[in-house]
Amino acid sequence: MAKIVDAIVTDEPALAPPVREPLLLTTPATSELLKFRDKVFTSRLLIVPGTDRTLPVNKAVVEVSVSDTDAVKFLKDNAEFELLKE
């Protein structure tokens, strides 16, 4: 037994909902990142003081954005880290 479907047929095209542009998630270019060498551990998770943000250390290196002043100050002031020159 087939179902009967009532449909309204019009000459006007159906209006599609507006399409949103996708958000582009960009990562900072390598020139905008600072790399610090961890002199003590090869892997750990740092917590930036005064914030709830964390910085992962992988292979004795932690990367932070130049614009992240809190993290840059924390790493520069800590004797366990040294700025890597690229």
Image: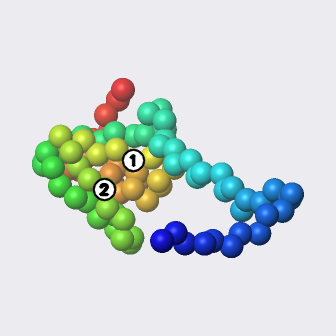
Q: Is residue 58 left or right of residue 35?
A: left
Residue 12 position within the rendered picture, expressed as x and y whole percent measured from the top left = 86, 59
Q: Are marks 1 and 2 in contact (CB under 8 Å)?
A: yes
Query: 59 or 1, which is in the foreground?
Result: 1
Category of crowding for the residue at label 2, using alpha-carbon neighbours closer than 10 angstroms: few (below 14), some (14–19), many (at least 20): some
Category of crowding for the residue at label 1, using alpha-carbon neighbours closer than 10 angstroms: few (below 14), some (14–19), many (at least 20): some
Query: 19 or 29, which is in the foreground?
Result: 19
Residue 67 position within the rendered picture, expressed as x and y whole percent measured from the top left = 51, 49
Residue 81 position within the rendered picture, expressed as x and y whole percent measured from the top left = 25, 46
Q: Is residue 45 left or right of residue 41?
A: right
Location of mark 2 (residue): 55
Query: 38 or 52, which is in the foreground?
Result: 52
Residue at 51% x, 44% y is 26
Q: Which mark is residue 64?
A: 1
Under tag 1, what secondary structure? Answer: strand
Locate the C terminus and report the quarter of the image it occupies.
Answer: top left
Query: 35 or 1, which is in the foreground?
Result: 1
Residue at 23% x, 49% y is 57
| Type of amino acid at the residue the image marks with label 2 | Leu
Name of the residue lying farthest toward the front: 1
| Type of amino acid at the residue the image marks with label 1 | Val
Q: Earlier in the sequence, mark 1 or mark 2?
A: 2
Residue at 47% x, 55% y is 69
Alpha carbon separation for disc pair 1 and 2: 8 Å
Residue 58 position within the rendered picture, expressed as x and y whole percent measured from the top left = 21, 45
